Image (tube, rainbow, N blue to C red):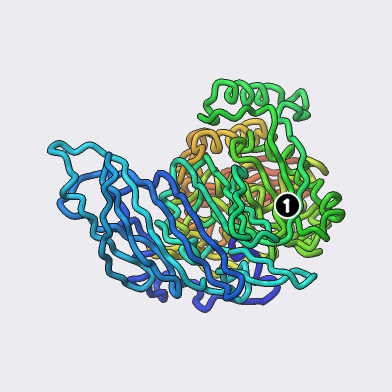
Amino acid sequence: MNRLYKSIFLFALSICNLQSAICQSFTHADTLRGSNGPGRDWWNVLHYNLNVKFDLDDSSISGWNEIQFKQLYTNEVLTMQIDLQDPLTIDSFIYQYKNSDITVNCSYTKSGNAYFVTLPLSKTLPNKFEPFITSAKIYYHGKPHIAKNAPWDGGMVWTKDKLGRPWISFACQGIGASCWFPCKDYQGDEPDNGATISITVPDSLMAIANGSLRQEHNAKKNTTYTWEVESPINVYDIVPYIGYYVHFSEIHNYKALSISKKNQEIADTAETTMASGAFGKRKRSYDGLDMSYWVLDYNLDKAKKQFKDAGRMMKAFEYWFGPYPFYEDDYKLVDAPYLGMENQSDIAYGNEYTNGYLGHDLSSSGWGLKWDFIIVHESAHEWFGNNITSKDIADMWIHEGFANYAEALFTEYYYGKEAGDDYVIGLRKNIVNDTPIIAPYGVNKEGSEDMYWKAANMIHMIRQVINNDTLFRQILIGLNKTFYHQTVTTQQIENYISTTSKIDFSKVFDQYLRTVQIPTLEYKTQDSTLSYRWTSCVPGFNLPLKINFKGEQWIKPTEEWKTIRIPSQGSDKFSVDRNFYINVKKVD
Ligand SMILES: [Zn+2]
C-alpha cells in the first residue's frame, strides 16, 4: 500500500523539488533505523515468537517477543540493536546461553527508539568460531502511538465498529513494526522461519494475525489466539486485527488455472518447477490454497459478493507471476479499520465494499471501476513486496511499481490487452516528477510516489521493447522464482531483467528511476528523411522506440542525430507508439 495515492486527494506535494537529494538532511536516528549498522549486521533473525495481551480498559498492551537468531561472526563484545518506539518501554532483556537453560538479564542503553544491549557473548564463544543459534526474550509494555490517519501515518488504530464495539489493528508500513513490538525493524532481515503471533483479548473478541490459526486458549475470561507464519515475513507486515469477526472461505486450486494453448508451455514449466519443490521448500501441496475472508459480522453478506474479486485476483496473478508464494501460510483478506495494506497472508481490506479506489478510477480509463482496487493492488504485493522484498525502502519501486503494473495485468487478463494498455497509460496523469523514484540509501527514506505510476509505465515500456509477451511473462515468473522469499536490491532486479531479456536496460532504469527528467525525442522531417535524437536524458540513453509512419517500425535513437528514409508523402502522419512514456518535440 505504502503512502498510496494520498496526494491525489490531499494534493500534498513534496517540500523539496528536483534537488531534493541535496536539500534533505538525515539524523542519526534515521541512520540507526534505515541501515544495517553495527548493532544489526552480526546477527540474522530466524524467528519471532510474539505474545501480546491487549488491555481494553486503558488501551495498553504488554507481553514479550522471543527472538531466535544466528550469530554470524565473532567478537569479544557484541552490541545488539533492538527497535521499540516510544512510548512503549522495554522491561527486561533476557539472553539465553547457547545450548543451555542458563539465562542472563542484560543491561541496555537507549538512543531514541533504539535500544542497545551488550550481550555476554564472549563467555560463550568457542575457540574456532562457528555460527550458532540462540535466543533473547524481550519483555515490554505501554500504550502504542495512535495513528491519526492510518494507513498514511501508521501506528495503532484503536477504534470502534459501526455498532460501537472495539475494533483494533495496526498500520506499520513507514512507521515500522517497532511501533507495537520490539524487533529488528529493518526490511533487509526477515525472520527466516517466520513468526508465531499469540494475541490475548477478552473472550467476546476475535484476534486474527498472519499465517494459519494454530490454537485458541481460554483462561480467566480471555482468549489467546495463536497464529503461525512459516515463511520469511516482512516485519512491517506482522499485524493483528481484533474485533467481532466472522469468516468464510474457499479453496483455490492452482491446477484449475485456465490457460490458453499459446501459453501452455510456460504453464507446464511452472507446474513442473513446483512439483520439484524449487518454488517452495516447504511441505504444503499446491493442490489447495485456503483463501479465507474475515469480516465484521454485519459485513458478511456484502463480503460474500465483493470478495469474489479475490478468487479472480489469484487466478490472474498466478498466471502472470507464478504460484502464490505463501501456500503454506494460506491467504486471508481481513476487514480493517483503515483503507488497506499488504500485510503478508493477512491483507487489510477497507475499501468500503466498492469497486475502484473508494469508488474512483485512478486511471480515468473506466477499467479501474471493473474491480476492487484494494483486493487487486494489495494482493499483488504478495508477489512483489512480500515474496520479493527490497532490503532498503529507498528501493520500494520494486514493491509499488510492479503492484501498480499488476493492476494493468489484471485488467488485461479479464478485459483484453488494449484495456490493460488504456489503464497503465491512464495512470500517467498522476506522475509528478518531483524527486527520483530511488531515494538515498541507509536512512529509512522512500523515493517519490512516482514509484507507482511512473515505475509501472517504465515496466510497460520495457515490455514493449522486449516485444515478446511470452518472454515478458517468463521474466515476471522468473523474478518470483529466482528471488523467492528473498530481500533484494534494485540492482539485482535490474540485472535480472536485462540478462534474461538479453537487452541492456541499464540506461532506461537510470533515466526513469534515478532522475526526474522525461526523455525527449527531438525530430525533424525533410523531404524523404526523418532525423531524430534523444535529449533530456542520461548519457548513453538508448531506449528503442516504436513509431508509426504509415505502419509500425522501430528506431534506435541515441543522443546523436540519426536519420531514416521515409515516404515523402505522409511525413505529417508521424507518431510515437502510445505505450511509451516520453516527450516528443519537433524541431526546425
Ligand atoms: Zn502498494
Task: Indicate whether 293 appears above or below 328.
Answer: below
Q: How many marks?
A: 1
Element at label 1: strand
Note whether residue 54 is visible. Answer: yes
Which of the four quarters of the rendered structure image does ligand 1 lie in? bottom right
- Image point (57%, 71%), residue name: 153
In the image, what residue type sits under mark 1? Trp
Identify the residue position indicated by label 1 in the image.
Answer: 294
Horizontal placement of 341 versus 183: left or right?
Answer: right
Pick whichever, 43 or 207, lies toward us: 207
Give percent across and percent down for residue 15.
Answer: 52, 78
- Image point (76%, 73%), residue name: 164
Which quarter of the image is occupied by the N terminus? Answer: bottom right
Quarter of image, res 105: bottom left
Neighbourhood count class around disc 1 (C-alpha, 10 Å): few under 14, some 14–19, many 20 upward: many
Horizontal placement of 130 versus 66: left or right?
Answer: left
Give percent across and percent down for residue 219.
Answer: 59, 55
Pick whichever, 284 or 498, lies toward us: 284
Quarter of image, res 126: top left
Ligand 1 contact, mark 1 (Cβ < 8 Å): no
Task: Indicate whether 581 appears above or below 461.
Answer: below
- Image point (81%, 42%), residue name: 414
- Image point (63%, 60%), residue name: 221
Note whether residue 520 is visible. Answer: no
Give percent across and percent down for residue 369.
Answer: 82, 57
